[in-house]
Image (cartoon, helix red, strand yellow):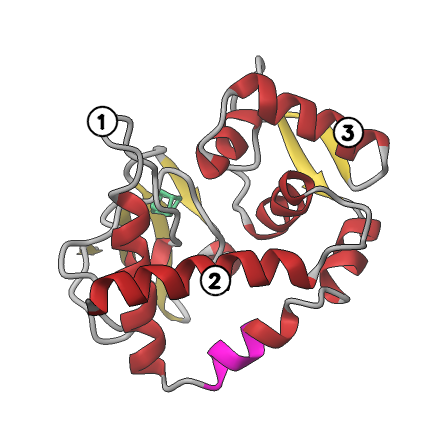
Amino acid sequence: MLSLEIGELLLQLGRGMLAEREGDRLTSAQWFAILFFSRANVFSRTLSGLAAYQATTRGTASQTIKSLVQRGYLVRKKSPYDGRSSILSPTEKARMRMAADPLASVFNDIDALSPHKQELLRDILRQLVGQLGGEARRQAVGSCRDCIFLLIRRLKAQEGIQVNFFCKCIGMPVNEKDLELLCTSFQAKTGAASHWTGGKRDEEES
Ligand code: SF4
């Protein structure tokens, strides 16, 4: 059965990707966490964000974070958005670790696929991740560029048109440079595979 074969290949790929980086003295959970905090936006780089990403309890995520802070991979700062929580950011050591990641070759292989194939693959995998976990569905992460909550405002300015980005879920402006980062509040637009430039999205003009 083709579906079984695809499922087995996904398992083999996941296991193989983790095996690529064995021997670096990081557990899989720690490595996943560094990857997440290196790629996530400021709203998601929290204890709850990691717990949602790894589909684990807050206690387990807290242990992983604690060990990474102690080993100098993460720094903790008070959140400017919520006084009760902290924002975790990768240190230079974490960035260097990610830059030398043996999995970079896998990402390069994906990058060699056509944009259409990459989008298709991402959308299928996102759908499969979103269906895991039964009633407690796993949240598939994504970025602003194809999220239903992104509002684009085009304002007439002296120098021409000024484009601003706003998140309707979080109720905060989003920097243009952060549009590609992972977000745990992400909600895919239905029928996703829309190109950044071609897809229809919520826009305002004033
Ligand atoms: S627009 Fe979507 S992906 Fe971007 S910050 Fe808001 S919820 Fe997250």
Residue 67's disc number: 3
| First of labels 2, 1 by sequence position | 2
Please give the name of the residue rendered at 57% of the width and 13% of the height, measured from the top-left corner: 84
Cα–Cα span, label 2 and label 3: 28 Å
Where in the image, quadrant-wise, is ligand 1 located?
A: top left
In the structure shown, which secondary structural element does the residue marked by tag 3 occupy?
helix
- Principal secondary structure, stretch drawn in magenta: helix
Q: Nearer the viewer, mark 2 or mark 3?
A: 2
The part of the image, by quadrant, that contains residue 107 is bottom right
Q: Position of residue 130 (x, y in %)?
A: 28, 44
Q: Position of residue 15 (x, y in %)?
A: 54, 56
Q: Mark 1 highlights which residue?
A: 135
The part of the image, by quadrant, that contains residue 115 is bottom left
Q: Position of residue 55 (x, y in %)?
A: 44, 32
Residue 50's disc number: none
| Magenta span of residues | 107-112
Residue 12's disc number: 2
Camera-side residue of 191 and 154: 191
Camera-side residue of 192 and 21: 21
Residue 108 forms part of the magenta stretch = yes
Q: Residues within 10 Å of mark 2 (few under 14, many from 20)?
A: few
Cα–Cα span, label 3 and label 1: 31 Å
Question: Amino acid type of disc 1?
Answer: Glu
Question: Amino acid type of disc 2?
Answer: Gln
Question: Amino acid type of disc 3?
Answer: Ser
